């Protein structure tokens, strides 16, 4: 029997570089499509969403957030600056270490949040540590 191709969705969402092409699918385009699908779902389920601004959680969610903002007709803004000296937190040993480093990993641009209804687009769902600390 021939081996069956079973690509990991996390490659498209998170791990692969945006300039990669996997199984004939450009990763950047797949991320744009994910953002568009998210926006269409929001418009379908929450037509009066009241979103003022769309903010990505750096770095890999940028393309999805950008397309989501475009499709929703909302501004796209960078609300977080990533500390390049903090490694990927989901692979760090121990929850206490992960939580501490998440706090060091991202710094907010406060004016992008103050008084606004912000849609955060986050693709880092391995453990959810980043999302919990941000919110």
Image (tube, helix red, strand yellow):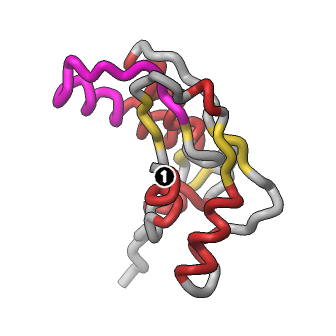
Q: Is residue 36 left or right of residue 43?
A: right
Q: Is residue 21 left or right of residue 95?
A: right
Residue at the top extreme of this rendering: 73
Q: Is residue 26 visible?
A: no
Badge 1 density bin: few <14, some 14–19, many ≥20, Cα 10 Å? many
Residue at 52% x, 17% y is 75
Residue at 49% x, 66% y is 129
Q: Is residue 113 visible?
A: yes
Q: Is residue 57 left or right of residue 86?
A: left
Q: Mark 1 falls on what kind of element?
A: loop
Quadrant location of the N terminus?
bottom left
Q: Nearer the viewer, residue 101 or 42?
A: 101
Q: Nearer the viewer, residue 33 or 107?
A: 107
In the displayed structure, 88 sits above or below 48; it is below
Residue that numbered label 1 is attached to: 123
Residue at 77% x, 53% y is 83
Residue at 67% x, 51% y is 106
Residue 27 position within the rendered picture, expressed as x and y whole percent measured from the top left: 57, 46
Magenta extent: 37-55
In the image, residue 92 lies in the stretch drawn in magenta: no
Number of numbered labels in the structure image:
1
Residue at the right extreme of this rendering: 85
């Amino acid at each position: 029997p021939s081996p069956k191709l079973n690509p990991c969705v996390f490659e498209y969402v998170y791990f692969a570089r945006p300039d990669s092409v996997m199984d004939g699918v450009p990763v950047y385009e797949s991320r744009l499509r994910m953002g568009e699908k998210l926006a269409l779902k929001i418009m379908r389920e929450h037509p009066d969403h009241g979103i003022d601004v769309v903010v990505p959680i750096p770095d890999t969610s940028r393309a999805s957030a950008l397309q989501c903002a475009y499709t929703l007709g909302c501004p796209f803004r960078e609300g977080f600056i990533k500390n390049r000296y903090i490694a990927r937190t989901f692979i760090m040993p121990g929850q206490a270490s992960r939580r501490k480093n998440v706090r060091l990993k991202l710094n907010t641009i406060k004016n992008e949040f103050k008084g606004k209804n912000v849609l955060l687009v986050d693709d880092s769902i391995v453990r959810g540590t980043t999302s919990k600390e941000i919110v």
